[in-house]
Amino acid sequence: MYDWRELVELYRLTMVPPSNLQPRYNICPTDTIDVIVSGGGDRTLIPMRWGLVPGWWKKPLKEIKVATFNARSDTIADKPMFRDSFKRRRCLIPASGYYEWVTTPEGKQPYYFTRRDGQVITVAGVQDGWTEPQCGERMRSCSMVITEANKFVSDIHGRMPVILDANDFDQWERGDAKDAAALMKPAAEELLQKWPVSKRVNSSRADSDDSTLIEKIELPK
């Protein structure tokens, strides 16, 4: 799992609030996640809701009927939920790993993906701020950008997160839409590793601090 030192070094954070990051192994859509935002020459970490709520949304949160935790690379520039954030408010989302599921005769089997070199995964993201119309409470939220899977991932799932290298950060954050779009491609085949994990991660009730959720299991033959 990543810690503050790793985040400060990787993202060159210039605004570093005191923090005690705790490992979490089961994060679900609408949970709060760590997001790196750039502005005024500084990068800072901001907690955000995983599931974008665009600033123009005028109805209660519960009336968003579409899933907005992932934004597809082939439609992000056109979909009303994402297009303004893609043009103006791109961000970086750190993760130690992520899960994908494959359908088997015994049900959906989760796999854990992480980098082979042990480094933090940086997922391309978009973010926005939204004000709740009734109480006036301000909230920040985000979406991860996904693209078609490379061959290594496609054995499990047809799509994968857009994973950025450190030398891509500036282009994603501050480049124009064309420059950003050039980065929305599958990761190199050798970047990730994967292994099957317990189906307990399928449940939102699984303890988020249970490190055994990412331990490799042996599948029945």
Image (tube, rainbow, N blue to C red):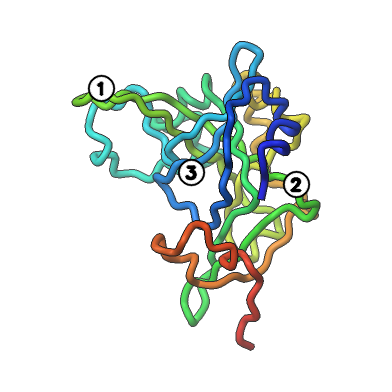
User: Mark 3: which secondary structure?
Assistant: strand
Can you identify the residue that label 3 sits on?
70
Q: Position of residue 57 (x, y in %)?
A: 30, 27
Give the residue type at disc 1. Gly
Marks 1 and 3, the one that precedes in the sequence: 3
Can you identify the residue that label 2 sits on?
119
Dots 2 and 3: beta carbons under 8 Å? Answer: no
Dots 1 and 3: beta carbons under 8 Å? Answer: no
Give the residue type at disc 3. Asn
Marks 1 and 2, the one that precedes in the sequence: 2
Give the residue type at disc 2. Gln
Instruction: Please determine whether, in this image, residue 39 is positioned above or below residue 59.
Output: above
Q: Position of residue 11 (x, y in %)?
A: 70, 30
**Residue in view at x 52 percent, y 58 percent:** 209
User: Depth-wise, is mark 1 or mark 3 nearer the camera?
Assistant: 1
Crowding at dot 1, Cα within 10 Å, few <14 / some 14-19 / many 20+, comes out as few
Q: Measure the alpha-carbon separation of dots 1 and 3.
A: 26 Å
Q: Position of residue 55 (x, y in %)?
A: 36, 23
